Image (cartoon, rainbow, N blue to C red):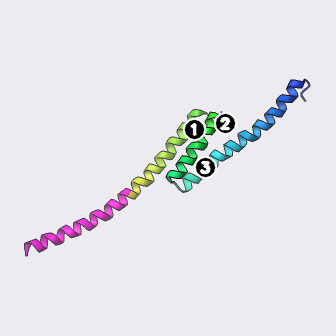
């Protein structure tokens, strides 16, 4: 047990800060996991804010925050590129059918 007055105060401060740090850590983990389940632009902004705050208050290292942000943005980009590819393939199928019809009609 702490003996001096300043050591007793330090124990109180550490207990308080441990609760705050735990809350920040839980917030960024929940934001990241929620984004991974449902990747959206709004979710990415929320995750970025939580990670930046955790890094700023030294709950996590700044490089870890940067690494997670990079991985999350790649996840969002991969999801968007897959959606674009699907929509392009649907459009290209439609355009090839119309071009075949127009060529046969032009030959008649």
- Is residue 67 inside the magenta stretch? no
Q: Are marks 1 and 2 in contact (CB under 8 Å)?
A: no
Q: Is residue 27 left or right of residue 41?
A: right
Residue under the image location 35 percent in, 61 percent down: 87
Q: Circle 3: is it few (<14), some (14-19), or many (20+) Cα within 10 Å? A: some
Q: Quadrant of the C terminus?
A: bottom left
Residue under the image location 40 percent in, 56 percent down: 82
Instruction: State the SS at label 3.
Output: helix
User: How far from the left and from the top, in percent, is residue 21?
Assistant: 71, 39
User: What is the spatial separation of the Cα atoms under label 1 and label 2, in whole angstroms?
Assistant: 10 Å
| For marks 3 and 1 on the same chain, the one whose residue lies earlier in the sequence | 3
| For marks 1 and 2 on the same chain, the one whose residue lies earlier in the sequence | 2
User: How far from the left and from the top, in percent, is residue 38?
Assistant: 54, 56
Q: Is residue 57 left or right of residue 80?
A: right
Image mark for residue 90: none
Q: Quadrant of the N terminus?
A: top right
Extent of the magenta region: 84-108
Q: Is residue 94 left or right of residue 87?
A: left
User: What is the spatial separation of the Cα atoms under label 2 and label 3, in whole angstroms?
Assistant: 15 Å
Image mark for residue 59: 2
Q: Circle 3 sits on which residue? A: 31
**Which residue is most to the bottom?**
108
Q: Circle 1 sits on which residue? A: 65
């Amino acid at each position: 047990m702490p003996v001096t007055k300043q050591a007793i105060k330090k124990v109180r401060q550490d207990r308080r800060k441990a609760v705050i740090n735990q809350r920040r850590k839980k917030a960024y983990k929940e934001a990241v996991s929620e984004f991974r389940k449902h990747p959206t632009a709004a979710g990415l902004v929320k995750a970025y804010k939580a990670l930046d705050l955790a890094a700023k208050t030294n709950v996590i290292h700044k490089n870890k925050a940067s690494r997670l942000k990079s991985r999350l943005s790649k996840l969002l980009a991969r999801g968007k590129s897959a959606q674009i590819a699907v929509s392009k393939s649907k459009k290209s199928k439609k355009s090839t059918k119309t071009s075949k019809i127009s060529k046969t009609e032009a030959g008649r």
